[in-house]
Image: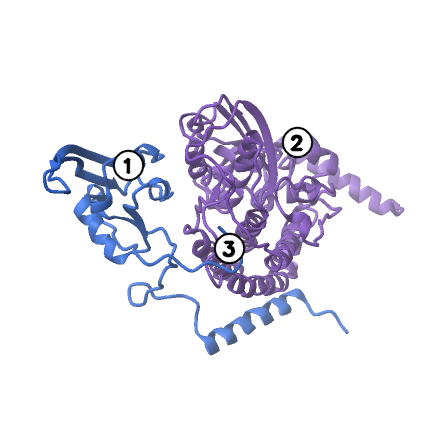
Chain colours: A purple, B blue
Amino acid sequence: MTELSERQQLSYIASQAADARLNVELETEGMTLNIGPQHPATHGTLRIIARLDGEQVVWAEPSAGYMHRGYEKLTEVRTFPQVTTLINRIDWLGSFANEVPFILAAEKLMEIEAPPRAQVIRTILFELSRIANVSLFLGDLGVQMGATTPAFLAFRDREYVLNLIESATGGRFHPNFDRIGGLKDDLPKGWINETTAVVKRLIGFCDENEDLLFGNEIFQSRMRGIGVIPAHVAEEYGLSGANLRASGVDYDLRRDNPVGLAWDKADWKVWTHPDGDSWARCWIRLQETRESCKIVLQLLEQIPAGPIMTKVPRIIKVPEGEAYVSTENPLGEMGYYVVSKGDLGPFRVKIRSASFNNISITPWVLKGVYVPDIITILASLYFILGDIDR
Amino acid sequence: MPKVPGLVKGLGVTLGIFGRTVKDGANTVQYPHEKESPPIRARGVIALHEDNCTACMLCSRSCPDWCIYIEGHKQLAPPRRAGGKPRQVNHLDRFDIDYALCMYCGICVEVCPFDALFWSPEYEYSEPKIADLLHDKEKLGEWMETVPEAPELEAGAGK
């Protein structure tokens, strides 16, 4: 602190007194602002109830459930092959990644393992769905701040990834390609060469995006130092994925617990950032897209030959037991707790989806921020409504 | 080297992309005038090969939202050899798929033990009225012409 001159001190005290007088004379009243459920910045139908004092948020609460589809209950009346169709729709931007933990949990109960070829192809498709998901985030990020160009670039390059997923699995958004004991089908001819070309293109997209958006001074001043989440708060609220790593916690299930998938065969890095602000969360996702591209390029060269399906009975009955498997999905940690009673379908499924926990921090992080920053903080937390409401 | 301001750098990216677009043409496809062909495996519409169907109801039962309606009856067919007994065969009376409900998961095609259902990448069958999305067995049979051969597999695919 620099020493203030007597004159400065006096003027400071005078201005403080003027402010105090003004506050007494103009007694302000709180105002409640509803953001959503039909607001474009909420990616669906999330409603944020914010109590404002002037331009500042005093209290905020997310109100989820406008798009609740009851998947946990629906899985109880479906058979195991039918459940993958449903859980595709949880996080609709990275659908293939939703299937994998459920299938792995079912395989754990049946005590079988997918053949190595299926494991590598699963990992490649998993990472491709992460690229498709996060590249949309990188484009959408600009739109939240009034820049439309990044969105066009993101949609252009995401299209190539979706075409790849479609030509391999048959579905652009809802692949339904994972089966208990392996995969539905093998890759079509020429897919590996196509994927290599597209993934190299996506690395170029990351560079473009970094120059266009992340280097922009306006973008930086809107993001840096805003919505800071310290590491201990992030851990207490159960954040996961890039939101947790942006707070400096080195935690990635792909490296720490690669259950039945082939991430350990590739050489890649888990990025963390010490700041924990909106900027760090976005930057981490950009780096992760690059790392995903690296993983895909490395795994494409080491797909082993062999079958893609183990021997499973035609009518799948999963033995009695309970299993929990979670993987590092595009949005964070996603897990399925499957309870089976030996029937055709699961007895009970608990879905731990990343976005639900990620938005639970909004009352904490939105306290004291200004109204325009609500949108940027929500954008940087990155949630998918289907993933919150299920 | 002095630091280039981010705004100028961003403008450079935009200009570069503009140049590429002028040179190579835009990525967008003007849909009704030009069409992209979907991949062979694309799940567009389900085609029915009626002769193979035995009305066993497996597809109808395994459908996650029960959008396949099947009715059939047993009837006697002439014997294969002269002097034999007449055979009992299942005859398909009704086979409807309600595309307003269908989730395009492909489980019905997968479970069919007699190869009666196929995926076709055809996608232009939207209707002004939602009730017209119920395709009967004649219409599903017409889609059979658009079913492509299965694609060749990548090297290393084993049995």
Q: Is residue A148 left or right of residue A292?
A: left
Identify the residue position indicated by label 1 in the image. Answer: B67
| A79 relative to A288, above or below | above
Residue A256 occupies which quadrant of the picture?
top right
Q: CA distance from mark 2 to mark 3?
A: 45 Å
Q: Is residue B63 left or right of residue A259?
A: left
Q: CA distance from mark 1 to mark 3?
A: 34 Å
Residue occupying image coordinates x 23% and y 48%: B49
Which of these two is toward me, B16 or A184?
Answer: A184
Identify the residue position indicated by label 3 in the image. Answer: B157
Q: Which x, y percent locates residue A56?
A: 61, 38
Q: Is residue A342 visible?
A: yes
Which of these two is toward me, B82 or B18?
Answer: B82
| A305 relative to B60, above or below | below
Q: Are tags 1 and 2 found on a single chain? A: no
Identify the residue position indicated by label 2 in the image. Answer: A237
Q: Residues within 10 Å of mark 2 (few under 14, many from 20)?
A: some
Q: CA distance from mark 1 to mark 2?
A: 42 Å
Q: Residues within 10 Å of mark 1 (few under 14, many from 20)?
A: some
> In front: mark 1 or mark 3?
3
Say the numbered circle drawn on residue A103: none
Q: Amino acid at mark 2?
A: Tyr
- Sooner in the amino-acid sequence: mark 1 or mark 3: 1
